[in-house]
Amino acid sequence: MTQKETLVQFLQGHLSQFFSSTAFSNLTIGHLIMIVIGLFFIYLAIKKEYQPLLLIPIGFGIILGNVPVIQGLQVGIFENGSVLNFMFSGVSKGIYPSLIFLGIGAMTDFSSLISNPKLILIGAAAQLGIFGAYAAALLLGFTPSASGAIGIIGAADGPTAIFLSSRLAPEYLGAIAISAYIYMSLVPYIQPPIMRMLTTSKERVIRMKPSRVVSKVEKILFPIIGLLLTCFIVPAGIPLLGMLFFGNLLKESGVTKRLADSAKGPLIDLVTILIGLTIGASTQADTFLTNQTLRIFVLGAFAFIIATIGGIVFVKFMNLFLKEGNKINPLIGNAGVAAMPDSARVSQVLGQEFDKTNHLLMHAMGPNVAGVIGSAVTAGILLSFLF
């Protein structure tokens, strides 16, 4: 063999070895499909402005997670010791959802709920979607634990869905989380047709009494009392409820403004980036593109629709027992789902469609924040029974 032939063989061997280590040699149709899905999410975020703070990190994460890598390089999200794996532990251990609840608490004003406590019942009624989807998932053959994790999509609360699925059904975590966030972003499109269908022209123009002024003492006591009531009943909800009420106390105490500003600003922004990126990266083609994933998306839509119906119908039921002048506009019933503040904004927009002088936003924030609390309580209940 001549020196030239030896050199050619040497180069061919090394080039072949190099090519086998690239993503091109391991690329499948499934990876390409997932990359296209990631690009579509980014398109929706930029072009249509659908939840850009969530869809851009998730979309980019989907692309990142579907670049085929050789096992053993410690770069894949499920490889122990890799950077992405360390970042993903914030999801799998429930750290990120708890920190997001801290930020939500620090940015939320519970005044509308404190001034009209009966609105919490609407938030509770909207949890009907969770249990409806739980029953449907069982009928479709999912295990009780997986069914509970799938059902929580009905709350339209991404962090709660991640927290619960990371414990009850980690194999479906990516599908459940993305389903929850997608339906959160579609709130302005899914809810209005249901709201129009279930309400009469007379109900849509009901004017609610202005909320009373809530004192500073009440605002300070609320997170403390709320913590004790909810966590003593459902201790499993402490990671979410504890952080939610702690964040709210930072806001309302008046002496920890810097901490509250950090929680609702830089902290929640950073965690949103990490949770979106790592959830997206966990949706790898071989585990995501399955019939089970499709079923989860269908069940998620069912849960969300039932939750919306539950909130609206319950308001109509409450009005049977309320005197004229104290009745509740059923258009705020949709806000019982925890997609805050989007579902409350839908109540406002739709209300003004029928009466431009009727302002429902502050009233809708009552069941909206109740829905956040309710979703965390329900997650704690499911965790207690199914874990």
Image (cartoon, rainbow, N blue to C red):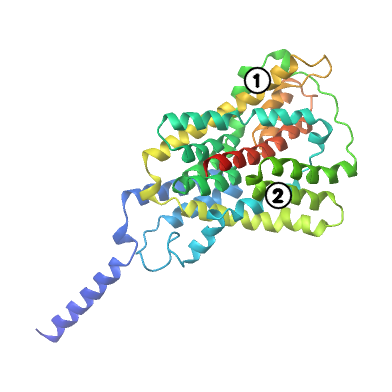
Between label 1 and label 2, give the one nearer the viewer: 2
Q: Which mark is residue 313?
A: 1
Q: Which mark is residue 32?
A: none
- Asked if residue 221 lies left or right of residue 80, the reply is right
- Asked if residue 382 lies left or right of residue 352, the reply is left
Q: Which mark is residue 242?
A: 2
The amino acid beneath tag 2 is Gly
Q: Nearer the viewer, residue 216 or 5?
A: 216
Q: Which residue occupies 50% across, 66% down?
A: 83
- Asked if residue 52 lies left or right of residue 8, the reply is right
Residue 238 screen position, x and y as percent = 67, 48
Residue 313 screen position, x and y as percent = 65, 20
Q: Residue furthest left?
A: 1
Q: Which residue occupies 47% across, 40% down?
A: 146
How many numbered circles does the render carry?
A: 2
Q: Nearer the viewer, residue 159 or 29?
A: 159
